[in-house]
Image: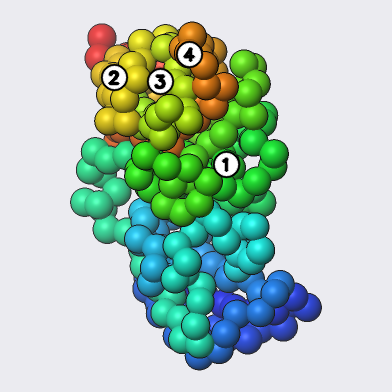
């Protein structure tokens, strides 16, 4: 598998590049400028361990298409990232092909600190029908970035998905291929008394199944086992706010635990699930 990391400027000019077989590193000795982008290219769809900045934890993600591009955050978008990220005049980037044992283990399948609005190739990917005032500190991507600190709000590491007081708010996490899930974990934002909380939340799976979960006023993890299901996405909705004085419930993190449905990425979740039912019968 050939992997390439690039830094390009606003005009598409390549400022730095590195290519390797199954693994590559790129050291960029310049300050980032407005409009710069970090690009990952892969010769085939695959799971990779990706580290685009030393201030952000590497993550195991699924590269579905041949190229992924991340605009180096600036302005308001920097609020979603560590103040040390993408700063300074030396940057170390790396990517490697994930090993089979890493891919096959049970893990949080809804973790991607490299997600953003424009991402359509690096999974998981989160998107929502509403985000508070369109601000980066309350974007959908914050719910899957791995940052769980939740006793404050509005800036890193206290970013969250904010619903702008909309009772019809919904957030979708796409996996980019069929996966087998067995647990869902919620971290509510808990900047009480500024924050409210949800007493109930519903999740609909891509296979059509829906479940509702009772939630409590807490910043601790609230986890729920679910019957193992093969899905391609989950949607969080039906958020029922507590009857307190605050109008500001928010989600710090959602985790979706499970395993890969190995050998299934070129087939639909429905086809894989049907085969799974035959095997269990």
Q: In this view, does 206 lie above or below 281?
A: below
Q: Is residue 168 above or below residue 142?
A: above
Q: Is residue 222 above or below residue 23?
A: above
> Disc 1 and disc 3: Cα gap in Å?
34 Å
Q: Can residue 216 be seen in this view?
A: yes
> Disc 4 and disc 3: Cα gap in Å?
42 Å
Pointer 3 or 2: first along the chain: 2
Mark seen at residue 138 = 1
Q: Point out the frontmost of discs 1 and 4.
A: 4
Mark seen at residue 273 = 3
- Whether label 2 touches label 4, CB < 8 Å: no
Q: Mark 2 points at which residue?
A: 224
Q: Name the residue under label 4.
A: 244
Nearer the observer, 278 or 158:
158
Secondary element type, mark 1: helix
Q: Is residue 60 above or below residue 279?
A: below
Pointer 4 or 3: first along the chain: 4
Q: Residue at x 66, y 83 (%)?
A: 14
Q: Point out the frontmost of discs 3 and 2.
A: 2
Q: Can residue 111 be seen in this view?
A: no
Label 2: how many residues lie within 10 Å, few (<14), some (14-19) or many (20+)?
some
> Disc 3 and disc 2: Cα gap in Å?
21 Å
Q: Point out the frontmost of discs 1 and 3.
A: 1
Label 3: how many residues lie within 10 Å, few (<14), some (14-19) or many (20+)?
some
Q: Where is residue 237 in the image (x, y as percent from the top left)?
A: 54, 18
Q: Position of residue 69 (x, y in %)?
A: 61, 63
């Amino acid at each position: 598998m050939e992997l390439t990391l690039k830094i390009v400027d606003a005009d598409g000019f390549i400022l730095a590049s590195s290519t390797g077989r199954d693994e590559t590193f790129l050291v960029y000795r310049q300050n980032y400028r407005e409009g710069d982008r970090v690009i990952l290219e892969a010769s085939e769809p695959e799971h990779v361990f990706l580290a685009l900045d030393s201030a952000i934890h590497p993550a195991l993600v699924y590269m579905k298409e041949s190229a992924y591009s991340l605009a180096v955050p600036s302005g308001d978008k920097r609020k979603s990232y560590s103040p040390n990220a993408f700063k300074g005049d030396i940057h170390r980037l790396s990517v490697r092909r994930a090993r089979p044992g890493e891919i096959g283990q049970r893990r949080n399948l809804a973790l991607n600190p490299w997600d953003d609005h424009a991402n359509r190739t690096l999974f998981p990917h989160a998107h929502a029908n509403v985000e508070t005032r369109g601000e980066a500190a309350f974007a959908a991507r914050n719910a899957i970035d791995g940052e769980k600190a939740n006793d404050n709000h509005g800036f890193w590491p206290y970013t969250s998905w904010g619903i702008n007081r909309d009772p019809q708010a919904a957030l979708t996490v796409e996996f980019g291929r069929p996966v087998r899930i067995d647990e869902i974990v919620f971290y509510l934002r808990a900047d009480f008394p500024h924050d409210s909380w949800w007493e109930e939340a519903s999740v609909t799976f891509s296979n059509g199944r829906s479940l509702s979960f009772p939630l409590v006023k807490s910043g601790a993890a609230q986890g729920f086992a679910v019957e193992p299901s093969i899905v391609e996405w989950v949607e969080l909705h039906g958020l029922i706010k507590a009857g307190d004085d605050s109008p500001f419930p928010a989600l710090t993190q959602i985790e979706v635990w499970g395993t890969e449905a190995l050998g299934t990425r070129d087939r639909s979740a429905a086809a894989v699930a049907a085969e799974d039912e035959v095997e269990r019968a």
